[in-house]
Amino acid sequence: MTTTVIDGRELQPPEPMERTLEALDTLAEGDDVLLLLYCQPHPLFSILKKNGYAWGEEVRADGTREIRIHKLPG
Amino acid sequence: MHASLSFDQAPPISVPYRFFLVAPWFGATAGILLVWAGADALGSRWTPEALALTHLIALGFMLQAMCGALFQFIPVAVGGNVWRPRLVANTVQPLLLLATLLLVAGLLFGRPVLLSAAVPLFLLAIGGFVTVVALALWQTPATGMTLWAMRMAIAGLAITVLLGSLLAEALAHGFAVPIVDLTNVHLGWGLGGWALMLLAGVSYHVVPMFQLTRPYPSWFTRSFGLLLLGFLLAWSSRLLLDDALWSPLIAYPLLLILSAYAGTTLWLQYTRRRKIHDATSLYFRVAMLSMLAFAVSGTVYFLRPELGADPRFVVWLGVLALVGVFVSAITGMMYKIVPFLNWLHLQRLGAPISAVPNMKKMIPADAMTGQLRLHVLAVLMLLTAVWQPGLIRPAGLALAASFAWLGCNLAGAVRRYQGFRDQIRAAA
């Protein structure tokens, strides 16, 4: 399993979303994308929901949100 | 995959833009009003010109811009869905526009019939807006302090409009109400409970996102809104209590939490690892420095009653709050929101990412920083003009020119959106 890490904390919108969508383009079955942000990317969540992706979210002590995205089976 | 992506049902781009495109021209009208009125306009907060100017900025610019931003911010930042956004915006925005014009004309020319005519329009427009926004904010599954601040802010807007309607009817019909205390409570809810609460809540989300700072400390976001709400409720008690000692007891901690918000935001900007000095960051810096100046001036107002007795002192506070803090912060926000919305909606057309122009191409950076410089000049001239009335006309001219430039920058962004949209559709 491979994890592609995108650190969006020092990138200005919409660059984190652009990079995430590009990474999802080449995401293999079982791999995931780890996106690091300081905010909740609701527009990205909408796209993921409607296109068969699932994600989990954890918040670190420094306020960083770890958003782990993978493709749903089928 | 991008061509097949389906974006969520965010409101059409015309919904926020119909508010944004109108807002700066109310500000420009405020500047022209100062040019027309001349030296006596800012002699006290109660002159017809000062009352009209206040509402041109607070309702014409701030409320229009903030309502437009909320339509888009709710789905983007807190994942909520506003009911029938196009219908609501198409109804609320013209009602708000007409109501503002009637109120301003009523205050400026002392026409009770115009004040009375404005009231039902405000109640209808803001009543409808508050209802649909509150539903969206309470139905979203999102959590966090941005959401709670927005919920409190929308309640603050409702209270402000109810108090304002009461004041307008009292002025129109000569009702026996404590006008001065009621006005102070009305402006407390308008500037604090609505505008500052919303600005703070939105800041928690957009300052880290667009200005690349660390997040606001969680102890701060958890306490700021509740403290602000608590002090505003206490401030409102002046309607029932003799306020000789009570007002300073409420005002000092209130000014302290304003300073805490401004100081925290400046500290986050100062300590970010990647320094960005774009128009939004600079506008926020101007807004936060103005807020600190407001807090210091407010403290002096209560500590030195002999200075506070000069009616121009409150006008000074009003210029700092309205033009220094809120016009600066809202303009800075619009300079990020509009390019971002352009990008988001072009993306929704289904073109590959490489075909969608960069956000930086939506409004030229030089145009934004040039307009920012003119705005800062206008703020400084207005503050000077409070004490040197001979400067009021040039200050009004600078204010009008700064808002007109903002209006042109936003209109240019919309034209660029239309151009890029047509190119993408043609290529498809």
Image (tube, helix red, strand yellow):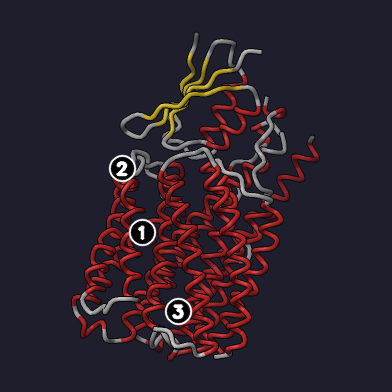
Q: Nearer the viewer, residue B232 or B30?
A: B232
Percent of width and height locating residue B114: 61, 85
* Residue denoted by label 1: B229
- Determine which quarter of the picture holds residue A17: top right
Chain on which label 3 sits: B
Side of B83 where B235 appears, left or right: left
| Quadrant occupied by the N terminus of chain B | top right
Name the amino acid type tagged 3.
Ala
User: Residue placed at 58% from the left, 89% from the top?
Assistant: B112
Q: Nearer the viewer, residue A49 or B291?
A: A49
Sequence-wise first label, 1 or 2: 2
Distance CA(mark 2)–CA(mark 3): 38 Å
Secondary structure at numbered mark 2: loop
Side of B363 where B313 appears, left or right: left
Of tags 1 and 2, which is closer to the observer?
1
- Labels 1 and 3 positioned on one and the same chain: yes
- Labels 1 and 2 positioned on one and the same chain: yes
Percent of width and height locating residue B328: 44, 62
* Residue denoted by label 3: B395
Percent of width and height locating residue B7: 66, 35
Question: Could you classify mark 1 by the number of other residues whose Cα lies within 10 Å: few (under 14), some (14-19), or many (20 or more)?
Answer: many
Q: Answer above or below: position of B24 versus A11.
A: below
Q: Is residue B363 visible?
A: no
Q: Answer above or below: position of B133 versus A5.
A: below
Side of B351 where A72 appears, left or right: left
| Label placed on residue B217 | 2
Sequence-wise first label, 1 or 3: 1
Name the amino acid type tagged 1.
Leu
